[in-house]
């Protein structure tokens, strides 16, 4: 018996039964497609949430590190104000030098010269080249300080620090004075403790340390007295000892801090 649907299909090529199957297949396809889209949206939301959490964690860590770095830097300032001999020297600068005077000194005296002495300096900070001579940078208890210094420490230019270092390691007063004049320096400030910074200064000058310091290989701890190991008499060693130097007039000496004027 021929069914009515078969006759219609034979005449027109259209079959209601097949259409229902095709319609059902299309519905399944749409359902699967919607399911996939929902899965993608869920994954996208999950990824987005994870990214936001990661950003918040990193931001929180950076804020904490920034506060830690600021606190570390403030401790450096406390060192200046608690150093009575140093404060006396910086105050002498404020009271006895021209208001526009510039002082050549190693970088770690810059805060005292500027904030207490109210005078300009040639260099304010260490350079990237000598970062390993900065106590805070190499503190083994706080290895994250290296990240903090890389992000926020205002490193001085290598060239300028190198020139200042060359001033101090020079064994010729005339050439040293030329370096000071190059940067418009009117005064030079040193302390008797600067002998212990000799190694860092020589490194900054890019000189051979063994030409300036003779350190026995069997020394395992720090050296309390660098004097016996010095191989050269330089501007730094002479000024740190309070010696008279041609071309410079010693204007202030309290037994620890010495201030020379270019003449």
Image (cartoon, rainbow, N blue to C red):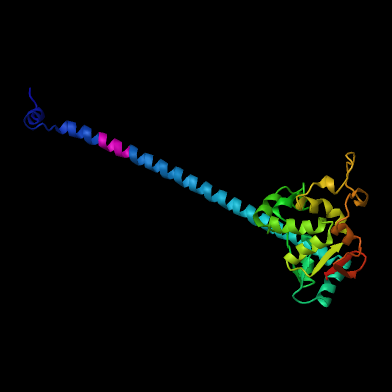
Q: Position of residue 82 (x, y in %)?
A: 85, 65
Image x and y of residue 148, in percent:
68, 53
- 30 drawn magenta: yes
Q: Position of residue 211 (x, y in %)?
A: 84, 47
Picture residue at 86% right of the left edge, 48% below the top? 213
Residue drawn at (22%, 36%), measured in percent from left and top? 23
Name the residue nearer the viewer: 251 or 223: 251
State yes or no: residue 106 in magenta.
no
- Out of 16 and 86, give the one closest to the viewer: 86
Dividing the picture into quarters, in which one does residue 102 lie? bottom right
Q: Which residues are magenta?
A: 25-31
- Residue occupying image coordinates x 73% and y 65%: 182
Residue at the outermost top position: 1
Q: Is residue 75 visible?
A: no
Q: Residue at x 65, y 54 (%)?
A: 151
Is the C terminus in the top left, top right, bottom left or bottom right quadrant?
Answer: bottom right
């Amino acid at each position: 018996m021929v069914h009515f649907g078969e006759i219609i299909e034979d005449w027109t090529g259209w079959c209601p039964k097949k259409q229902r199957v095709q319609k059902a297949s299309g519905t399944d396809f749409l359902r699967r497609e919607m399911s996939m889209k929902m899965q993608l949206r869920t994954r996208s939301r999950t990824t987005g949430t994870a990214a936001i959490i990661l950003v918040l964690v990193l931001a929180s860590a950076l804020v904490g590190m920034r506060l830690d770095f600021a606190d570390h830097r403030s401790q450096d300032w406390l060192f200046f104000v608690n150093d009575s001999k140093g404060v006396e020297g910086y105050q002498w600068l404020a009271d006895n030098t021209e208001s526009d005077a510039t002082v050549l000194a190693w970088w770690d005296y810059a805060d005292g010269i500027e904030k207490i002495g109210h005078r300009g300096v040639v260099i304010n900070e260490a350079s990237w080249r000598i970062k390993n001579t900065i106590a805070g940078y190499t503190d083994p208890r706080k290895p994250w300080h290296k990240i903090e210094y890389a992000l926020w420490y205002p490193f001085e230019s290598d060239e300028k620090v190198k020139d200042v270092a060359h001033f101090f390691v020079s064994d010729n007063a005339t050439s040293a004075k030329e370096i000071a004049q190059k940067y418009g320096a009117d005064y030079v400030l040193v302390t008797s403790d600067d002998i212990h910074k000799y190694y860092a200064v020589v490194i900054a000058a890019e000189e051979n340390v063994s030409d300036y310091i003779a350190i026995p290989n069997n020394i395992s701890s720090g050296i309390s007295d660098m004097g016996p190991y010095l191989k050269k008499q330089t501007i730094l060693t002479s000024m740190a000892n309070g010696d008279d130097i041609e071309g410079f007039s010693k204007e202030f000496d309290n037994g620890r801090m010495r201030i020379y004027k270019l003449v």
